[in-house]
Amino acid sequence: MTETLHRLRALPLRTRLALLVATAVAVAVAAVAAACWVVTRAQLEQQMDDSLRNVQVSDDYVQTLLVACTRPDRATAPPLQGTYTVQLVTVSGSTCTAAKTSPIGVTAADIAVAAHLRDNSLHSARAENGKGMRVYTYAYEPRSQVPGLLQGSFAVSIARPMSDVDDPLSTLAWVLLVVSGIGVIGAGAAGLWVARTGLRPVDELTETVEHVARTEDLTVHIPVEGEDEIARLSRSFNSMTASLASSRDRQAQLIADAGHELRTPLTSLRTNIELLARSDDTGRAIPPDDRRALMKSVKAQMTELASLIGDLQELARPDAADPGPLQVVALHDIADTALERARLRGPELTIRADLTPWYVRAEPAALERAVVNVLDNAVKFSPPHGTIEVALRNGELTVRDHGPGIPAEELPHVFERFWRSPSARQLPGSGLGLSIVARTVQQSGGEVTLRPAAEGDGTEASIRLPGAPQPPPGL
């Protein structure tokens, strides 16, 4: 059985479907044919029994049969018309039949009817010539006693050969067998045709998948027709290839943008280091002020490289990756910590904060980095000795600066990776900070927006996160 299942699994899917259809049709046809044969047999047998009960044997025929049996030299009783056989049965079990008729075996039921112990009996028996017979026996009382004839009570048996039923049933069985065979073969052929037709989209999908695996061409598209499962599978495959193509394009763009962003600080760093190395090689001392400026530039470029590498590591995680264990954290505490770092980066700026307690469910380190990026953005674009206003109310953290602001046509691009405003390209940064903010906030179930300040110059960043139950004290 196990080996058969393995062999079936090794067959092509369309062949298995055709075999399944043929088997199902064969079982159904066999069940219908068997039921038809059984019902027809029961009806034919019932009709035979009814015909035996309804046969009328006249007294004259019985008397003639009696004379033929007791005085064969005086009379001969002809058989009844048709296939009926008439036989007289005595109490002793002896029989009398018409001429050229094979006697039928007598049973105890027939003798009981002859003795008038039963009214009638209906059974199957076999004649002396070997034919199977269906026999109906009933008690008979002669109208008058004829001297020299059979005296006393006896029974009359009327019989028909079972071939009257068996022959039509045999013919019906052959007809059903032939029709069933034709039906099964036709069902198998139809199943194979349906399987080939129905699986044609699957074949196309398979060819497309093999093409993608062979050529890595993600631009292929499978035509979709209808609303069935194959159409859904085709749509899913098209969506998958489109997502893979988009992901590959984003990856290529990320590498290209990262290379571009890394080239600038690396070039500047290399130039400064070469100047310092040439000074040492030639023995020509660089003026102290210029040397300090070079060292300051080297440190700034190294800091920018470290920040860019950190941003790239953060973005290296897929968007669908697990952001880490989410915890109930105090957003106001995280904002307060981020404010301390912002004050160190912009000591000449005035930062005003109004933080009301608000608890959220997020990854603490990622959320703190997002808040720090928003504050760094405000510090970067604030004018000297400017003011930054930070507020946390009802789950919305807002950071407002008084810088030049962002043009309306640039707002849709601020959260894109490596995008930088043309007016900010001379400022340090990689263009990844706000994209990291957007992803972190979205993974925490919130939203982030950047809009012009309601009054005056500047930009206002807003982070809105759903609240979480405050943890018990001590946790």
Image (cartoon, rainbow, N blue to C red):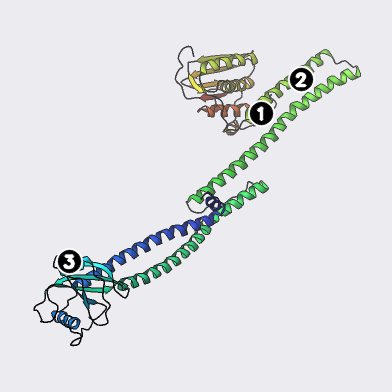
Q: Tag 3: residue type? A: Ala
Q: What residue would you read off at disc 1? A: 312
Q: Nearer the viewer, mark 2 or mark 3?
A: 3
Q: What residue would you read off at disc 3? A: 112
Q: Is residue 255 above or below residue 426?
A: below
Single out the residue that lies furthest toward the left: 144
* Crowd around label 2: few <14 · some 14–19 · many ≥20 (10 Å): many
Q: Tag 1: residue type? A: Leu
- Quarter-of-image position of residue 182: bottom left
Q: CA distance from mark 3 to mark 1?
A: 109 Å
Q: CA distance from mark 2 to mark 3?
A: 129 Å
Q: Nearer the viewer, mark 3 or mark 1?
A: 3
Is residue 340 toward the left or the right of residue 282 in the image?
left
Q: What residue would you read off at disc 2? A: 298
Q: Tag 2: residue type? A: Val
Is residue 25 toward the left or the right of residue 50 in the image?
right
Per the image, label 1 sits on a secondary structure element best described as helix
Q: CA distance from mark 1 to mark 2?
A: 21 Å
Horizontal and vertical percent position of residue 194? 49, 59
Horizontal and vertical percent position of residue 4? 53, 52
Badge 3 or badge 1: first in the primary sequence: 3
Asked whether residue 457 appears in the rendered view, the answer is no
Single out the residue that lies furthest toward the right: 282
Single out the residue that lies furthest toward the bottom: 74
